[in-house]
Amino acid sequence: MELEAGKIYEGKVTGITKFGAFVELEKGTTGMVHISEVANTFVSEIKDHLTEGQTVKVKVLSLGDDGKISLSIKKALPAPPKKDFRGGDNKGRFDKRPQGGFKKERPAYDAQPAADYTKTPPPVYINKTSDDQNFEDMLSRFKATSEEKFSDLKHVMDNKRRGSSRRK
C-alpha cells in the first residue's frame, strides 16, 4: 500500500515522546504526530490524550524525501464548531440574547445618516459689518485700536513702576 499526502489512514501508536507520538500505519511504515497535531486543544502532556497501542486515525501531512512521514490526528478529526467571543457556538448568535443579569436590553433604533455635505457646503460665517468695507479700512481700524490698547497698557505699566519706587 502506497501512502499519499492528504489521505486519512488508521494506525497504531507505537511510541510516545515529549514532542510527539509515533504511529505505525502499515508493517514497517511509521510516521510521527507532532504534539501540536495531537488534538484541537492545547496539549501539554501527550500521555493525557494518547496511550501506546491505541488505534488512531491520522492524516498524512507530508512525505519527506528522507523517508520521514508527518502525520496529524487533529486534521483527521471533524472540525470542531467555531466559538464566538463569549465561548458559545455561533448557531443562533443573533437570535438569542442572554436573559437576566443587571444589563438591560437596548432598544433598537434606526441610525440616522450623517449629514451629506457633498451637495451643499456648510455655511461659512464672516464677520462683516458693511458691504463696502475694504481691506485698507479694516487694516487702519486694526492699527488704531491696537495703538489705543498699547498706549493704555504702557500707561498702566508706567504707573506701576512709579508706585513701586515711591513705596521704598
Image: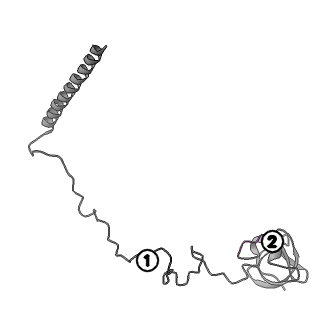
Residue at the spot 88% in from the left edge and 83% down from the top edge: 53
Left or right, 117 with respect to 68, comes to left
Q: Are marks 1 and 2 in contact (CB under 8 Å)?
A: no
Q: Nearer the viewer, residue 36 or 59?
A: 36
Residue at the spot 15% in from the left edge and 30% down from the top edge: 144
Mark 1 and mark 2: Cα distance apart in space: 44 Å
Please give the residue where the numbered disc 2 appears in the rendered image.
45
Observer able to see residue 10: yes
Left or right, 111 with respect to 63, comes to left
Question: Sequence-wise, which precedes: disc 1 or disc 2?
Answer: 2
Left or right, 120 with respect to 24, comes to left
Image: magenta residue range: 41-46
Left or right, 96 with respect to 143, comes to right
The part of the image, by quadrant, that contains residue 9 is: bottom right
Per the image, label 1 sits on a secondary structure element best described as loop
The part of the image, by quadrant, that contains residue 91 is: bottom right
Q: Which mark is residue 105?
A: 1
Disc 2 residue type (three-letter): Glu
Question: Does the stretch in magenta take in 9?
Answer: no
Observer able to see residue 32: no
Q: Nearer the viewer, residue 168 or 20?
A: 168
From the viewer's perspective, is the residue at label 1 or at label 2 nearer?
1
The part of the image, by quadrant, that contains residue 71 is: bottom right
Q: Which residue is most to the right?
A: 28
Residue 154, relative to residue 61: is it above or below? above
Q: Position of residue 64 (x, y in %)?
A: 81, 71
